[in-house]
Image (cartoon, rainbow, N blue to C red):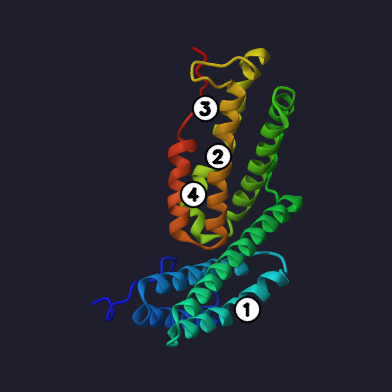
């Protein structure tokens, strides 16, 4: 049964142009051949590299910039994957196959790094293109500015750095919400985080006396600033995962991360227990 019905790749083929889709289907045939003829370990390595290629191609069609490095990596990775599969299918010794597996791991890591670089570049582009901001977003910026100025006088540089990263990701996500059919599942959650959770968290922290917020340890052995910092880190990572899913045109990822944002942030309030 495993030979007749080989396992499907972990990451589905994204919705891309017809030309790119044809190329992915060609690679998919090679990956399925690997599943039929290779052992599970080698087939899984092939599939992991293919998953990374599919994630990268989703970013190629999402990015607003001409990214030559992204294009070169995509073209090189297609040929490399087929070459490595052919090498694994040859009757060679185990050491030679181990070298091919290492090359597959290296390819996957390179694709991941290029994808992360492309995402960060796109986020920065969105934050510098202020002409694309909506009136709603400008109103949010005006609402947040006084809070950020007050917070800046009460916390260390680490908290301010995280807040800046969160703002960049919110700009990226909210500016994409009207452009992506995939984003409907998470749009409301992101807006609630921007308009409710984040300002409420900062206001809750600002209610505390400065000496209590920064130095006095609470019942859970953390200071209020450390609690705020930890929660902001969690929010930043959650927004990062959502941005990656959007950039990769991963509808399932958007659904999963959108639900997580709703459960952990959008429908929750930030409280500091000073008892």
The answer to the question of whether label 4 and label 3 lie on touching residues, with beta carbons closer than 8 A, is no
What separation in Å lies between label 4 and label 3 (alpha carbons)? Answer: 20 Å
Q: Position of residue 113 (x, y in %)?
A: 62, 61
Question: Where, quadrant-wise, is the N terminus in this rendering?
Answer: bottom left
Residue displayed at 70% across by 38% down: 161
* Tag 2 residue: 235
Front residue of 115/167: it is 115
Nearest the eye: 27 or 134: 27
- In primary-sequence order, the first of circles 1 and 2 is 1
Tell me the residue that label 4 is attached to: 186
What secondary structure is marked by label 2? helix
Q: Quadrant of residue 117?
A: bottom right
Q: Which residue is mark 1?
A: 76
Q: Residue at x 43, y 85 (%)?
A: 89
- Quick check: 191 above or below 64? above
| Tag 3 residue | 270
Tell me: 39 left or right of 235: left
């Amino acid at each position: 049964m495993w030979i007749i019905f080989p396992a499907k790749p972990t990451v589905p083929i994204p919705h891309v142009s017809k030309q790119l889709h044809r190329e992915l289907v060609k690679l998919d045939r090679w990956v399925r051949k690997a599943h039929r003829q290779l052992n599970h370990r080698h087939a899984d390595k092939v599939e992991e590299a293919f998953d990374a290629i599919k994630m990268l191609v989703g970013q190629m069609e999402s990015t607003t910039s001409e990214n030559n490095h992204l294009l070169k990596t995509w073209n090189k990775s297609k040929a490399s994957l087929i070459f490595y599969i052919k090498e694994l299918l040859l009757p060679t010794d185990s050491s030679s196959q181990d070298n091919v597996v290492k090359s597959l791991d290296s390819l996957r890591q390179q694709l991941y790094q290029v994808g992360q670089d492309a995402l960060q570049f796109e986020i920065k582009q969105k934050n510098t293109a202020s002409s694309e901001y909506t009136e709603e977003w400008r109103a949010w910026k005006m609402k947040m500015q006084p809070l950020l100025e007050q917070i800046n006088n009460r916390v260390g540089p680490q908290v301010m750095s995280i807040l800046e990263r969160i703002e960049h990701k919110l700009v990226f996500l909210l500016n994409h919400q009207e452009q992506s059919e995939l984003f409907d599942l998470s749009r409301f959650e992101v807006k609630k985080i921007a308009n409710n959770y984040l300002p409420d968290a900062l206001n809750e922290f600002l209610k505390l006396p400065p000496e209590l917020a920064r130095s006095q340890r609470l019942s859970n052995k953390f200071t209020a600033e450390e609690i705020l910092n930890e929660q902001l880190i969690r929010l930043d990572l959650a927004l990062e995962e959502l941005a990656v899913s959007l950039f990769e045109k991963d509808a399932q990822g958007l659904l999963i991360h959108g639900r997580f944002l709703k459960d952990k942030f959008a429908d929750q309030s930030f409280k500091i227990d000073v008892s």
